[in-house]
Image (spheres, helix red, strand yellow):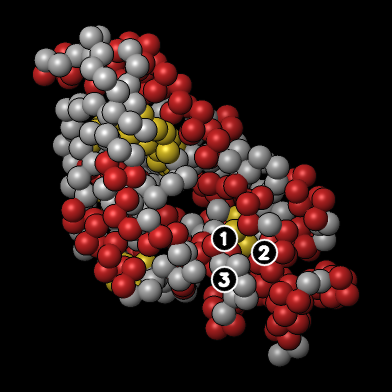
Amino acid sequence: MTASPPISTLPTEPSALYDLTQQIKAWGKELGFDEIGISDGKLGKHETHLDNWLAKGMHGEMGYMQKHGTKRTRPHELVAGTRSVVSVRLDYAPADIKHAENVLTQTDTAYISRYALGRDYHKVLRNKLQKLATRIQDEVGEFGYRVFTDSAPVMEKALAEKAGLGWIGKHSNLLDSKTGSWFFLGEIYLDFELPSDTPATNHCGTCTKCIEVCPTQAIVGPYQVDARLCISYLTIELKGSIPIELRPKMGNRIYGCDDCQFVCPWNKFAQTSKEPDFSPRAQLTDRKLSELFGWSETQFLSKTEGTAIRRIGYQAWLRNVAVALGNADTSAEVLTALNDKRDTASELVLEHIDWALEQHTK
């Protein structure tokens, strides 16, 4: 993006710019966003935090976290000419959130992070963000912009915190005192300046519930998550073998993990999503592990079409389910599912199948 030439319809007076921000927020609400805020994109303290995290190697195999250098923390370096950032929030909490937590106690049933059960949020948010950017252009004329939703080196939680949408909690998720943390974030980088909102303040207090509940103790300290231990990283980002010592701690979680959100006191205020695209799909929600392990690659691609799950690929899917089967209560159904896959499994999946079978002979 390059900075656009001055446009006569773009307001310059402070009062007119303020009015434009209010219009942007109203248009965003009309498009279905639950909250909209604006920041200047200056992320000094967050850049220091990121640098320290990277220096400790806590990003694991996520090389993209350091690949782009300061472009991640300096919006104007990623998109030349950026002067303001519009941050948006879109709630995704399903209506049955209490039931979802109970699934973690059903060892023969697969637990998938609630955000992944509906349509891929990247597609939903990007479409709405593009519509919002177009609506702004209709009002003020052409300008330079770019939309993002977890799709580029963007510090979305830091930007959202600066825009007043919430604070980054001890588990590293964004929290809002009125709606908790069950939401997605997206951004529009703009090449003109808008008045910034007041940054959110932290309200975690002395609470450490998220740290205490983490199955793999991945939250190694307040605001410090070691991705190498995190179940979301292990089941989604990690491409190879899951460390043996972490497998028993994963339980039946085959894609992501929501434990730190379940116990967060602020999530008693969580708002059920109004977005139909985020409705959980029956073919993915709370299915038996043996059923999911029996899917062919064609079935996997078909049943996960349009969801974020599909991006991990079939082999990682089988690897994850094999670990969960190893953690399930021993039954003929579980043993049959594991043995039936041995002859056709890849080397990666076979390793996890054999580990799982070993758990049932102890």
Per the model, the C-alpha gap separating discs 3 and 1 is: 13 Å
Q: Which of 137 and 278 is in front in this view?
A: 137
Residue kind at label 2, given as amino acid type: Ala
- How far across and how far down the image is residue 85, in percent? 28, 35
- How far across and how far down the image is residue 65, in percent? 40, 60
Q: Name the residue under label 2.
A: 316
Whichever of callouts 3 and 1 sits on the residue coming sooner in the sequence is 1
Horizontal arrangement in the rendering, residue 12 relative to residue 109 (left or right): left
Q: Name the residue under label 1.
A: 236
Q: In which quarter of the image is residue 344?
A: bottom right
- The circle on residue 250 is 3
SS at circle 2 = helix
Residue kind at label 1, given as amino acid type: Ile
Residue at (75% x, 48% y) in the render: 301
Per the model, the C-alpha gap separating discs 1 and 2 is: 8 Å
Residue kind at label 3, given as amino acid type: Met
Whichever of callouts 1 and 2 sits on the residue coming sooner in the sequence is 1
